[in-house]
Image: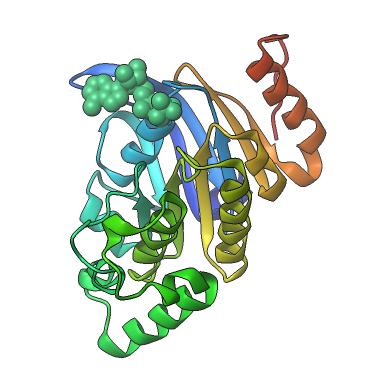
Amino acid sequence: MTDQRREDLLVTESLDAGYAGVPVLRGIDLSVPTGSLAVVLGANGAGKTTLLRSIMGLAERHGGTVRVAGEECGHDPVDMLARGVVMVPEGRRLFGDLTVDENLETGALVGVATARRSELRDMVFDLFPRVRERVDQRARTLSGGEQQMVAIGRALMSDPSTLLIDEASLGLAPVIVDDLFDMIADVNRAGITVVAVEQNLAVLDLASHGYLLEQGRMRAGGSMETHGAQIRALITEAYLGVDDTKEVGA
Ligand code: ATP
């Protein structure tokens, strides 16, 4: 491993993962620098959710390592939370009968001090003014976009350094997706490292780092600043099914 990779906030090396002994991911190398907004694109079934779940210790890890801030992590969701890594699951998974505020509060149950909770709540309201407006509304009565904002807000209430976001755009209208992606960029600008897995190519416009996952393998990846054109070309080709012979490394 290079010194640069060793210093990155979240690093997977040769990560193999799956379910019930059946492999889904093979040899995944992912390196997410502190403060970056990394995007992992891939088609249905490519293994995007499995990647986030295996980092979090929620899918089986068959081999390889996960490091946070240079330390190798066990396969334990509680340990990952303690290290400041939190996941926003696909499909939001809010408590529909609880209010927005009560849903946010569940995110702070991981032991965030009371004084810090009110600072975090203010941060969530600044990032998502719509959430503030709907604070007493039951979560099940929110629109899909609003529910996604609350799901991200709930994760922020645990005071994370790294947010893993699983397909925030799922089931949302394009205009809502654009707003939501802008908000994810705002979350990143607030100092939180983000790993967003997506099928929606528009997310690349926000990315500092882009990766392509295909059939459980990482095909391409790296800094958009230095390799953006190549990464975009490769991802577009993969999505359009044109040319699958090129590789990009960074
Ligand atoms: P999508 O965009 O459809 O959510 P994805 O890229 O997130 O897809 P995964 O959900 O990670 O892909 O699924 C990758 C593979 O793992 C698929 O073949 C899927 O059937 C399998 N898989 C996912 N979850 C499980 C599970 N709980 N048990 C067994 N196999 C699973």
Residue plotted at (46% across, 35% down) = 13
* Quarter of image, res 227: top right
* Vertical comparison of 134 with 206: above or below: below
* Quarter of image, res 25: top left
Q: Position of residue 3 (x, y in %)?
A: 60, 49
Task: Give the side of residue 236 with respect to residue 160, left or right.
Answer: right
On-image quarter of the C terminus: top right
Residue found farthest to the front: 141
* Vertical comparison of 206 with 220: above or below: below
Q: Does any portion of residue 54 appear in the rendered image?
A: yes
* Vertical comparison of 179 with 217: above or below: below
Residue plotted at (44% across, 60% down) = 149
Task: Give the side of residue 205 with respect to residue 213, left or right.
Answer: right
Q: Does any portion of residue 3 appear in the rendered image?
A: no
Task: Give the side of residue 121 with respect to residue 249, left or right.
Answer: left
Task: Give the side of residue 137 with respect to residue 129, left or right.
Answer: left
Q: Position of residue 224 (x, y in %)?
A: 74, 43
On-image quarter of the N terminus: top right
Ligand 1 placement by image quarter: top left
- In-front residue for pair 131/235: 131
Residue plotted at (31% across, 58% down) = 141
* Vertical comparison of 39 with 114: above or below: above
Q: Position of residue 131 (x, y in %)?
A: 43, 70
Q: Position of residue 233 (x, y in %)?
A: 77, 25
